[in-house]
Image (cartoon, rainbow, N blue to C red):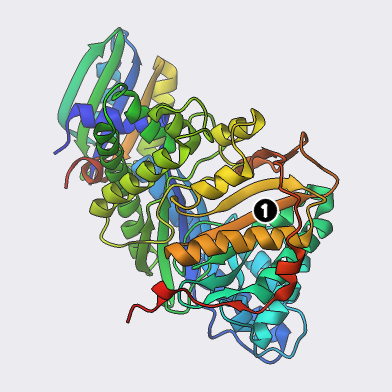
């Protein structure tokens, strides 16, 4: 199962490191990263594979929400199907 | 493959523009629950619903978590209870309504629809008992919804039923007067009723439906409004195109949720209902879309034309996104559930007569409209007849959900709470239709019913 992790918030040092650390710690393999700064806001989209994960999507989501709160950004974890459905025919 | 722009667009739709899947509604056939003893029938109804819908709420919550899109309601529709109850040796179906209420609460859904009768052309014994039971059923249950079909393009309009439904609406208001006639918010009167509608209060599981089915209602007025902000100043072609593209995206999410829910619940995937269903939340309003297109206020001149375009463009966009489309499919205009409509009534721009005109081009009818408590049963019947005539002649669904609030009049407002919102009492024309309503009988099916 592939997931999309979206991180949006005020830019700060170490956001990418913290998020990729969280994914690595839970056995989630990163396939693609897109990151930029738009008007001072940090935007990052990570596509990752849960095939080797040692947590469920729901557990990862809870961990990501907690990390987001700690470092002051909004982290969403979603199944990739919603994006595929919405943006491709 | 999607791009970063696509991902951020989807995220914005969900977090800022109230994109959601409005409802996953499980339709359950209760045709095998009949029994001469009403207590046995009630138990069979309870058992069947709690078995079939046991995992409905959990499945909805799981999908919401996995996909990251809110799924607001999980609901159930059942076979019209007039048919299920018909074999019972009873003169009231209130015990069956209570069984529905208890079962729905046990599985955790927030509404159950199908305390219904289909009397387009006339009553059976069960239809009559059911309709007589509606006021007490709605007053003694919390989450049971009722609907009565009183006409269709194929059958004409049953004016005996129209007359009786005016009285039933009044009686329901009287029995629930302590709660501002909340019972009437759970009662819909249809012309050209829809057997696979997932939206309340008018959902029921039609007789042509399978044993168990999943129907999904999408939403997203806020998303359409936001998309239209990017084409300000452009012509109506650009407006229609933008709505179509947005409706396509919204519907694709609904299609995904419906397919996955049906698979997990071991039920047939029925239809996607392509409706823009507003909520009282700021930014989730159909009226605001019309104002974004260029009206000073919803209800003013131009409202019917802009609504017609919106309704049509939503269907064209949504149709491409789903393999099975059905239900009501169009823009809803429930007054109390739409912040922009509430404002339009409050400032005097939106009247009952303009709402009636709007129902000629949108998907439903006079919906969630609070009217003075002293409005007579005959006047309510006549409003129902007018609305049914629009549906019958134009071969479309129309519905009436009026709330005559006891003790309140124009200038007052009524608070239903939650998604049902609040509504200012709207003025009703008081010239009397009593002689017309007293005639009864049937308005014959129109010439356009003869299509064979």
Q: Within the image, what quadrant is residue A43 found in? A: top left
Q: Residue B134's spot in the image, x, y percent?
A: 72, 69
B343 is higher (above) or lower (below) than A58? above
Total tally of numbered discs in the picture: 1
Q: Residue B197 versus residue B444: which sits nearer the camera? A: B444
B397 is higher (above) or lower (below) than A32? below
* Residue hosting label 1: B402
Q: Residue B203's spot in the image, x, y percent?
A: 53, 63
Q: Residue at x 73, y 61 (%)?
A: B433
B244 is higher (above) or lower (below) than B283? below
Q: Residue A89's spot in the image, x, y percent?
A: 16, 47
Whether residue B107 is visible to the viewer of this picture, yes or no, is no
Q: Is residue B55 left or right of residue B410?
A: left
Q: Is residue B427 left or right of residue A75?
A: right
Q: Residue at x 23, y 52 (%)?
A: B320
Q: Is residue B440 left or right of residue B119?
A: right
């Amino acid at each position: 199962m592939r997931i999309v992790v979206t991180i949006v918030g005020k830019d700060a040092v170490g956001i990418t490191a913290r998020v990729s650390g969280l994914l690595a710690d839970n056995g989630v393999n990163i396939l693609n990263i897109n990151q930029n700064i738009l008007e001072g806001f940090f935007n990052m989209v990570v596509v990752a594979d849960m095939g080797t994960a040692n947590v469920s999507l729901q557990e990862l989501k809870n961990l990501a929400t907690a990390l987001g709160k700690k470092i002051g950004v909004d982290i969403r974890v979603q199944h990739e199907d919603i994006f595929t459905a919405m943006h491709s025919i | 493959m999607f791009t970063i722009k696509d991902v951020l667009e989807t995220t914005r739709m969900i977090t800022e523009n109230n994109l959601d899947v409005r409802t996953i509604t499980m339709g359950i056939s209760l045709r095998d629950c009949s029994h001469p003893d009403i207590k046995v029938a009630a138990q069979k109804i309870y058992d069947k619903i709690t078995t079939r819908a046991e995992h409905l709420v959990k499945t909805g919550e799981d999908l919401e978590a996995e996909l990251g899109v809110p799924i607001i309601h999980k609901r159930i529709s059942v076979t019209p209870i007039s048919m299920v109850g018909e074999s019972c040796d009873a003169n009231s179906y209130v015990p069956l309504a209570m069984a529905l209420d208890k079962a729905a609460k046990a599985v955790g859904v927030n509404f159950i629809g199908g305390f219904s009768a289909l009397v387009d052309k006339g009553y059976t014994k069960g239809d009559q008992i059911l309709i007589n039971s509606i006021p007490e059923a709605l007053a003694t249950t919390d989450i049971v919804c009722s609907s009565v079909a009183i006409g269709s393009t194929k059958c004409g309009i049953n004016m005996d039923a129209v007359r009786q439904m005016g009285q039933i609406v009044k009686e329901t208001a009287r029995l629930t007067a302590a709660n501002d006639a909340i019972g009437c918010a759970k009662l819909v009167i249809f012309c050209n009723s829809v057997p696979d509608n997932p939206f309340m209060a008018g959902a029921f599981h039609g007789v042509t439906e399978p044993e168990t089915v999943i129907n999904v209602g999408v939403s997203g007025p806020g998303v359409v409004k936001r998309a239209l902000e990017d084409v300000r100043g452009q012509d109506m072609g650009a407006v229609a195109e933008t709505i179509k593209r947005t409706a396509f995206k919204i519907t694709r999410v609904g299609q995904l949720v419906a397919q996955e829910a049906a698979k997990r619940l071991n039920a047939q995937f029925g239809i996607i209902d392509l409706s823009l269903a507003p909520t009282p939340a700021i930014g989730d309003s159909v009226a605001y879309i019309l104002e974004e297109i260029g009206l000073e206020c919803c209800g003013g001149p131009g409202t019917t034309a802009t609504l017609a375009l919106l309704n049509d463009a939503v269907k064209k966009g949504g149709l491409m996104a789903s393999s099975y489309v059905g239900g009501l499919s169009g823009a809803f205009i429930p007054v109390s559930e739409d912040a922009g409509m509430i404002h339009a009534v409050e400032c005097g721009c939106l009247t009952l007569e303009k709402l009636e005109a709007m129902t000629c081009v949108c998907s439903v009818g006079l919906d969630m409209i609070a009217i003075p408590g002293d409005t007579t049963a005959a006047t309510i019947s006549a409003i129902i007849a007018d609305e049914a005539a629009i549906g019958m002649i134009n071969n479309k669904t129309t519905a009436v959900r009026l709330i005559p609030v006891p003790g309140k009049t124009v200038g007052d407002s009524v608070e239903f709470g939650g998604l049902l919102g609040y509504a200012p009492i709207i003025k009703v024309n008081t010239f009397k239709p009593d002689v017309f309503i007293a005639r009864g009988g049937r308005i014959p099916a129109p010439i356009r019913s003869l299509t064979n």
